[in-house]
Amino acid sequence: MSGELILFERDGDVGLLTFNQPDRLNAMTQAMGEAFADRVASLRDDESLRALVLTGAGRAFSAGGDLDMIEGRAVQGREAPGLARRPIRDGMRSFYKLFLSVRDLPFPTLAAINGAAIGAGFCVALGCDIRIVSERAKLGLNFTKLGLHPGMGATWTVPRLVGPGLAAELLFSSRLVDGAEAARIGLANRAVAPERVVQDTRALAGEIAACGPRANRAVKRALARTLDATLEDQLSFEASEQAINFEEADVHEGIAAVREKREPRFQGR
């Protein structure tokens, strides 16, 4: 329905979530965050989903935080300096969690960045596992241009993708980059023609969905823990996950498919 803030559709085992307030460039309001978190929660335990694509309706992925909301926080802080810090902090943390709930999904997530992704809007895309971006899209973390410290995990995610030096440049300067540069420096996996963004992202999601779903869910867990793990820890995790896989039907199907020179038909069991 056109009035819904978050749209959902699925094609077999691949889902598509769409921010749906194009007249406001999909600005991130409290209402949109709550609708997004509710939809994500409804998908979290869906064993039949193997991948999810996130995109925005209209000409933007998301132009970032709602300016009225940001101004409201600024008024609150100015009217009660010191006293307002804790409620503002707690409110912002709760707001972050609504949109970053995408990070909690157990299957691979892909952002199809069809247009502008700015500030907190870009941070949501950075919360996905993979990003395919329009080569013409404008992307950036413009927090300091507002006199505001970055939020929504920007100072955690960006250095891990592009390294500390380039992260510092982008975060200090609020500089925008186009899709081609984003792909070159590692903020996106690849840049494609604008009309191909959603199509190509869905095609990649289909490739992922054709692989062993239980194996891919374990890969997602492995990637999430690797930044804090030693090599020995990670080797133990990998060996344990493989031991589980060897008990399952999917690995036998994968082996049979290789021997029979055909595509595997994984059942997720």
Image: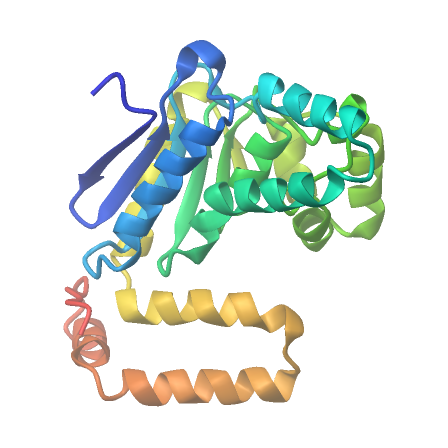
Residue 244 left/right relative to 227? left
Residue found 60% across the figure and 33% down from its top: 120
Q: Residue at x 70, y 32 (%)?
A: 141
Residue 66 versus residue 94: which sits nearer the camera? 94
Q: Position of residue 99 (x, y in %)?
A: 48, 41
Quadrant in the picture for residue 111: top left
Residue 169 location (% of width, % of height): 84, 37
Q: Residue at x 27, y 55 (%)?
A: 50
Question: Compared with residue 86, is residue 220 higher up or lower down, i.e. above or below?
Answer: below
**Residue 189 visible, this angle:** no
Judge left or right: residue 127 versus residue 48. right
Q: Tell me the quarter of the image containing the C terminus.
A: bottom left
- Pick out the residue farthest to the top: 23
Say whether residue 178 is left or right of residue 195. right
Q: Tell me what residue is drawn at x 84 percent, y 29 percent.
A: 173
Residue 245 image position (x, y, % from top left): 29, 82
Total tally of numbered discs in the picture: 0
Residue 121, given in percent of the width and then of the height, sits at: 55, 31
Quadrant in which the N terminus appears: top left
